[in-house]
Each structure stands twice: as structure tokens, then as C-alpha cells.
Image: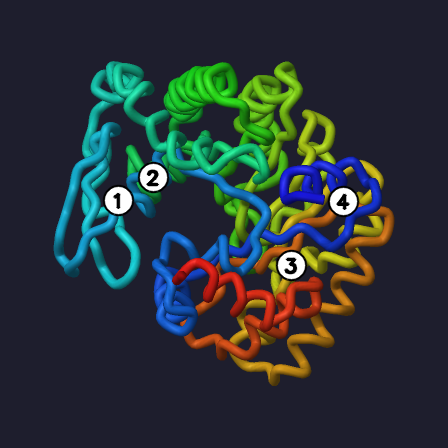
Amino acid sequence: MNAKSRVHAALRREPVDRVPIWMWFHPHTTKRLSELLEVPTSRVADVMGDDIRQAWVGNNYAMEGIVHEFDGEMHTDFWGVEWIKEGPFNQIRRSPLQDADEKEILDYRYPYDHIDELLENMEPVVSVGRDFFIGCDVSPCLFEMVCRIRGMEAAALDLAASPQLSQAMLEQASAFSVRLAEAACDRFAIDWLWTGDDVGGQQGMLMSPECWRDTIYPHLARIFDVGKSRGKWVAYHSCGSIRPIISDLIEIGLDVLNPIQCNCPGMDPIELKKEYGTALSFMGGVDTQRLLPNGSEDEVYRGTMHLLEEMTADGGYVLAASHAVPPETPMENIFAMYRAAGVSREEILDRAADLRT
């Protein structure tokens, strides 16, 4: 069973030789692994045995895909957002509509002229061959994208004080996300369309569930439909506590929910599996706040094994962390997590050695 067939089988709730894996490492964690394994950072996923390959083609590429060497280096993306490197990630320095009046907001145009250029980011992914499960990430799609071009505070205020203007901005974001998703699905032989917006916080949603249903739901349904109508799996990412809208996401066709931040209220992955597991697959749930960075090797192994026993029952699960695996995580804990999934340290080291020869 190769990586592609393994993920498809898991999502179809069919037997697999081992649980599929897709791990999101903090950049510093990736660097530590590359140094330990003596392989380039770009090959860490290959050596670790991850099953999914994916690229950003939306605005997340501007945040995570454009790499600066030094803090303070900046760039402006196709959306007009100014970014500055602070630590391992790019942070927003200025949003193009943060001081804009209503006319400027309504006249704002998304970067349709750059869609072909954005889609070029998929070329290295699709070139890896047919053995991997291939994803295309068009996120952030709606509210989070509006926050980036309008500014977080202004975007939140617009929801309450200027609902018509807020809806107009969401319409703009939705139309571009649909166009980008259509182009990606029609151009590449992808396995899933990856969508998302962070609408959850550590203690609850960033807006009421009712507000989300009124403002976000219909637009997200159109984006999901791009993938569904083309026979693709549809995945959705939102950090934080989003339990109140999971049924809504299923209703509009969601297949896979990520990252399942298990320390947030209502987001215990095992409870979610019991309630929604017949209709929804899950990816994530390995605790990155306490267990991975602070647990012992044995605790990580046993904790991951318990999660897998519950989450893989009847299929519908991809092993992943609840957020980026932090750089303070002991290497032995990372190997213990993979060992629980059926990928031994020896197997990883052998692949690294093969790559070096």
C-alpha cells in the first residue's frame, strides 16, 4: 500500500496497513530533524514517512512559503499585505485596507491576474509522482483573509457595526477563493482541496455560531462545492474551539477536519469521533501544548497509541499534531509518536541513510 492509497483508504474507512501520517513541524523543529538525520529540510517529510504532500497557493503562501533569512526583512504580497519576518514566521506589518474608506474597500480587487503565478507553487508537489496523496491549500478563504487585508480589529468591528460592508468584503474573498479553487482543481490531479479560516480561539469561537452561519456558511458552502463537484475530498482547517459549527461543516460537505486542538473546550478528539465519526474524518489531535514538548518518551508513545486506538476504529483518521510540533519537543518524543503509528526509528534512519548515498 503506497501513501496515496493509504490515505484514500483511511478516508473511505477501509482497512489500511498503518495509519496515514501528515505532520506539521515548526520550522525550527524541521531544522533540528534535518540536522539530526543529515538530510535537507525539504526532505524531512520523505524520511519521516509522511503520506501527504501539499502546497499553499493562497495567501498562506505569503505568510509561510516566502522565506526570509533575517529578522526585519519584508515583502508585500499580491494582496497588498506587507509582511515582516519576526522569529521563524512572517507577521503582518500593514494591511492594505486598514485605514480605507467604504469606496476604497468596495473598489479593492483580489489578485486574479496572479492566479497562474500562485498555482506554480503546486508544480514541485505534483512532480513528486503518483505515490503520494496530493493536496492544494487555498486558505485562508474568508474571514481570516478579510482580517489580513482589513486588519483584525477593523474586520471584527465591521461585522458588528457595518454588516453590509463586511458582507461585501466576504463576497470579494469568496469569489476569489472559488476562482482559485476551480483553477487548482481543473489544472492539477489533486486528491483533496484544503480550505480554512481560523474562526476559533482557545476558549471559544471568534464570533457567535449564529453570526458564522449568517456570514460565513453560505460562502464556505460554495468553496466546498468546487472540490465536491470535481470528486475531490474537502478538508478544512481552523484552530481553536469550533465545536458549535461542526455539524454545519458536515452539512455543506466537509470530509476532513483539522487540526483538532485537544486542549480547547469541546475539542477532545475522541469525543468528536464518537459524535461525528460516521460523517467526518479527522486529522490531528496529538497535544502540542503539554504532551509532546513536556511528556516523557513513554507518555508520548502511550498517549499516541490511545489516540490511535480510538480514532482509527472504523477508519476516518490521519495522524497529525494539534498544531505545529514545537521546537522544544525532544527528538525522542517525535520518534515515539511515529513509532506508535507503525514507523520505527530504524526505518526513518534507514531512509535518511539511503537519501545520503
Residue type of the residue flagged with mark 4: Gly
The residue shown at (47%, 61%) is 354
Residue that badge 2 annotates: 61
Q: Nearer the viewer, residue 145 or 180?
A: 180
Along the horizontal axis of the image, is 219 left or right of 6? left
Q: Are marks 2 and 4 in contact (CB under 8 Å)?
A: no
The residue shown at (72%, 49%) is 317
Q: Nearer the viewer, residue 164 or 123?
A: 123
Q: CA distance from mark 1 to mark 2?
A: 7 Å
The label nearer to you, 3 versus 4, is 4
Residue that badge 3 annotates: 285
Can you tell which mark lies on residue 66? 1
Which callout, 2 or 4, points at the residue further toward the start of the chain?
2
Along the horizontal axis of the image, is 95 left or right of 65? left
Residue 182, position as x, y percentages in the image: 49, 16
Q: Residues within 10 Å of mark 1 (few under 14, many from 20)?
A: some
Q: Residues within 10 Å of mark 3 (few under 14, many from 20)?
A: many
